[in-house]
Image (cartoon, grey):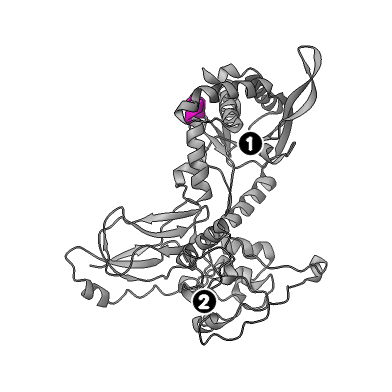
Amino acid sequence: MPIEIKMPALSPTMEEGTLAKWLVKPGDEIRSGDIMAEIETDKATMEFEAVDEGTLVSIAVEEGTENVSVGTVIAVLAEEGEDADAAAAAPTPAPAPAAPPSNDGPAATPTARKLAEANGIDLNTITGTGPNGKITKDDVEAAGGTSAPAPAPIPATAAAAAPAASGERIVASPLAKRIAEQKGIDLSTITGSGPNGRIVKADVEDAAPGAAPAAAASAPAPTPAPTPSVSPADGGAPYEEVKLNNVRKVIARRLTEAKLNIPHIYLTVDVRLDPLLKLRSQLNASLEADGVKLSVNDLIIKALARALQREPQCNVSFQGDVMHQYSRQDISVAVAAPSGLITPIITDAGNKGLAQISTEMKELAGKARDGKLQPHEYQGGTASLSNLGMFGTKQFDAVINPPQAMILAVGAGEQRPFVVDGALQVATVMSVTGSFDHRAIDGVDGAKLLDQFRSVIENPMGLVV
């Protein structure tokens, strides 16, 4: 009997995703554990592994397709020993009839329903493009906050033939965009081979930076560059509309929820870095033969974990009527990736050595920038760290990453007048600001944590024992 392969939920918050690329084709033998596709979730672009075994009979969802709901059939396998041709000829089960509108309105994803409510949009005026006519988030966004019905879908042939006019964005997969950015390739010079002319990974992998595609003999004359859009609401400034990727949408939603629902309290301390910098230099000299080079951020991760060990009442999360107090210090570290901010986790940082923390952090940061983090590498964490010191930022207030109850914002170390042992000297000083969920952490407890953090940094031998 044919096996249906369905769009997986690759993260707890995933409702829909983009099928970025198929790595198999009909007729291929599939074994459990084989990588079948690359799927862009609400967190990152991830590889989808096969669970069942058999022969790939057909692909139901083409690569490059966006807003594929979790549970949608994306491919069909024939079981081992089953006639693949017969499986291919077997009728595909008819989709379930669309559910009649409930008292809450027509069928829509939870995200679409929230977005419509926030913008005062009547879902009954929108034509759904999801499975069985279900209204998706993009359908609501297309409505533009008005009560007018969503425009009818453009036929695929027309979409493929339509030039990029009226300031229309270049259509490319997230993976293709990342590769193009890394190689310095102008996507406007690439001809897409994906569905509806979408630019996919293969189109940019072999392209030279700045290279233009070979012109076809029958190609029409180039279309003049479109005039940039302007809006009176923007003061007439020209702009290009850039569609949010899944990661950026999740960041926007979670940070808005955090600022609206979490009563933040901010506490700042100045920390003298000179002893830490001296210890780092000594450690790096001794670890050079092992190929390990510690960064200041590696030592700060360990210092935060050590401070949480000493002040465990700050290693908590607010859970409504209860709190969770953790006995392990899992530090989420903010990393800027091409698709948006993500926080890979150094688990049990309090009990790990500095060399191990450094090695793990470099590996996780690389995977984050390549969009290859696995869910267990970024989901969870008991406290967060955001370091913008390398960009010269002196001091900032970070937004808490729920359900965590605190995040440490680290600024740049700079030469300042500072009192050392009762005498005024010039020292390397950095400002550190803790953001605390006041429902879970009192101000005095947050102050104790920062005091312990400062003590560890200024007396850093405690980091190596």
Side of 106 relative to 23 (left or right): right
Q: Residue at x 57, y 71 (%)?
A: 189
Q: Secondary structure at mark 2?
A: loop
Does label 2 or label 1 sit earlier along the sequence?
A: 2
Q: Is any atom of residue 219 visible in this view?
A: yes
Q: Residue at x 76, y 69 (%)?
A: 238
- Mark nearest the camera among 2 and 1 is 2
* Coordinates of residue 372 in the picture (x, y in percent): 46, 50
Q: Secondary structure at mark 1?
A: strand
Extreme residue in the left direction? 81
Residue 407, disc: 1
How far apart are labels 2 and 1 at the CA level? Answer: 51 Å
Which residue occupies the foreground of this view, 166 or 84?
A: 166
For the magenta stretch, what is the residue range? 349-356
Q: Is residue 351 above or below residue 381?
A: above
Residue 214, disc: 2
Give, as a three-letter code, the residue at label 1: Ile
User: Disc 2 vs disc 1: Cβ atoms closer than 8 Å?
Assistant: no
